[in-house]
Image (cartoon, grey):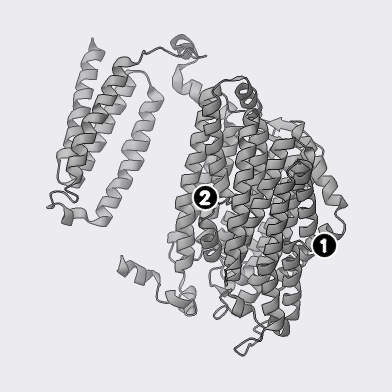
Amino acid sequence: MPTPDVTPIIPELILMVAACLVLVVEPFLKLDKTAVVAIALTGLLAYGAAAFALLGQDMAGFNDMVVINDYAIFFKVLFAAAGVMTVLMSPRYLEAHDRHLGEYYALLLFAILGMSVLAAARDLMAFYVGLELMAVSSYLLAGFFRYQLRSNEAALKYFLTGSFASAITLYGISMVYGFTGATNYAVVGTALAGGENTLAVAFATALVFAGLGFKVSVAPFHMWTPDVYEGAPTPIAGFFSVGPKAAGFAAILMMFLAVFEASVDTWTVIFIAFSIFTMLVGNLFALVQRNVKRMLAYSSIAHVGYLLAGMGALGRSGDLLAGEAILLYLAAYTFMNMGAFGVLVYLKTQQPVTFDYTLDDMAGLARRSPWAAILMSLFMFSLTGIPGTAGFIGKFYLFNAVVRADLVWLAAIAVIFSAVSAYYYLRVMIYMFFRESEEEFVVGESISGPLAASLGLAAAGVLFIGLVPARLVDASVGAFQNFLGL
Amino acid sequence: MVEKVLFVVFAALAVGSGVGVITRSNIVHALMLLIFSFVNIAAIYLLTSAFFIAVVQILVYAGAILVLFTFVVMFLNLRQYQSMEQLHPTQKWVALILTPLVLAEFVVVALAATWTAVGGAYDPETVAAGGGNVALLGERLFADALLPFEMASLILLVGMVGAVVLAAKEGHEYMDTRAWSGTDEERTPEFVEQEV
């Protein structure tokens, strides 16, 4: 039996070694977990660097199950950035909750490994195991604070609904396998294009859409999102809002362009309809939240709605622009949302007892901690889509692509909802700058170095993408064109 | 001839213990009979040369799943329900209608379907030449599907790590400092155990 060529999975292997090292080193440590954090961080950086070094490669491995190309590398680098920010945010936060265990970092690395395989998969089997690895690690991370009822609730809800969604996806996949007898994306795509079972294929498409839609929290499959974000440790909630979403969209793009190419008319309509509903639900529910973490959860649903509009445009026009805009948006979204959750992590570490993520807890922040207030404002501006920030660039390219696909009305709806979203994002700023805190506030301790680095990275990302978008635009154009040359 | 006799013996044992599963009122006895039934079904798989499925049947069903059942039953202490005839009496009437319907459906499908073998790459001759179905399956699994196989092992590893994270006892340095965590301040492991 020939030895398989491992080049396509070198970054993943690095990640796996780092995760296992974390598990091996952890039992030898007492309260000081610096070594574990260092290993996790080094592993993530090496993973990103290895992916970056492979840029320009285009090869498949393991019986054509995974590929390494610019598309996969784009997502790997994105996951590495999200992972680094999460790891940097975590140590002080977990110490404040008396639950600083090495397993946390190992699970995080395994989740990223699953996401990475998901984005690189070219085969339904590899796709599914990647999805499951990501999901199982995520359930555990959501329930990491096992003494807190909210964390238990988050884990249980995420686990039950998530396994149900996985099973639905699997059912759709099994139908596809039944029609075609193959699991390779390209082979399945060709076979489905030549086949007849149109109604059955449409059914399978809908099943896979529902399963993946759950993972990226498309309304009406979004019910778990606010509860899970609220109960999960805050760095993990931030990670959930960007990592699995980006991975989910990487898989959605590939699934629907390569596998379900034949039923493009069906899924375009599905995506457009769900896009409108998701934007509506996300934005309306975000308006009434007084808990900032829940507000960010609903806002993340709204952002998924915009991305779905991009998918609809892609299906309708087949224009490269839409796919590139989705990648760009995901990158911009990663930095701004991680940043917003990072500020919450900082505030919670400062006042572990009293801070409960409500708007009232944010009152008077500008006076107590001006830097935190300024950074939070930057991320809120970016999430709203104010020019000069990453959020604006993302929305600009995405809505532009929607208009180009002759869906002016859909772009108009998206812009209107963006304007609505300004209300709940800017309300956070009003509380921070113009309301006085009701209780006396004592500054606990200055910000920890890693957390500051994490927030700095997020802010730099937001400003860099916002002010000099050319580099990222080039990267996403290259990545997406390369993806279509499958 | 020998095979036929063996088949009848194993099938009778499987069905007999299956009937026992649903008639025993002691749930532990029922579980033991279920394991026995599974083992007999595994023997029938062996008779049809489906060695791999036979092994999986014993490992997964008779081994893992039934052990899990037994543990759950023993933890939950179901003895108190033994005396009760039936928890939901109305179910009986629904079952009376639904069961014959399902049976009729099975019979109709079994009679109407035409059974044809699907011609694939593996007919009995090639399987025999390749060294039996276990060997062929192993080759496919470790050559063509190597990546998903290894990924599955990672998923299992994550499951084990998760069990430790969620269930392991913590050192005492963590215990006393949890007072601030709001409503759940008394939920130490001991407290939870008492509750259960």
Q: Quadrant of residue A261?
A: top right
Quadrant location, the C terminus of chain A: top right
Q: Which amino acid, mark 2?
A: Val
Q: Secondary structure at mark 1?
A: loop
Of A363 and B163, nearer the camera is A363
Give me the C-alpha separation between circle 2 and circle 1.
38 Å
Residue at figure coordinates x 57%, y 24% from the top left: A182
Q: In the displayed structure, does residue A222 sit left or right of residue A392?
A: left
Q: Quadrant of residue A433?
A: bottom right
Q: Is residue A464 visible?
A: yes
Mark 2 sits on what residue?
A: A136
Q: Residue at the spot x=65%, y=81% of the render?
A: A363
**Foreground residue among A219 and A40:** A219
Which of the labelled discs sits on residue A290, or is there none? none
Residue drawn at point x = 86 percent, y = 60 percent: A467
Subunit ID for the residue under disc 2? A
Q: Is residue A80 visible?
A: no
**Mark sitting earlier along the chain (2/1):** 2
User: Mark 1 — residue?
Assistant: A387
Residue at the spot 77% in from the left edge and 37% down from the top edge: A319
Q: Secondary structure at mark 2?
A: helix
In front of the other: A142 or A424 = A424
Q: Residues within 10 Å of mark 2 (few under 14, many from 20)?
A: many
Q: How many marks?
A: 2
Residue B32: image location, x then y, percent = 22, 40
Q: Position of residue A71 (x, y in %)?
A: 75, 40
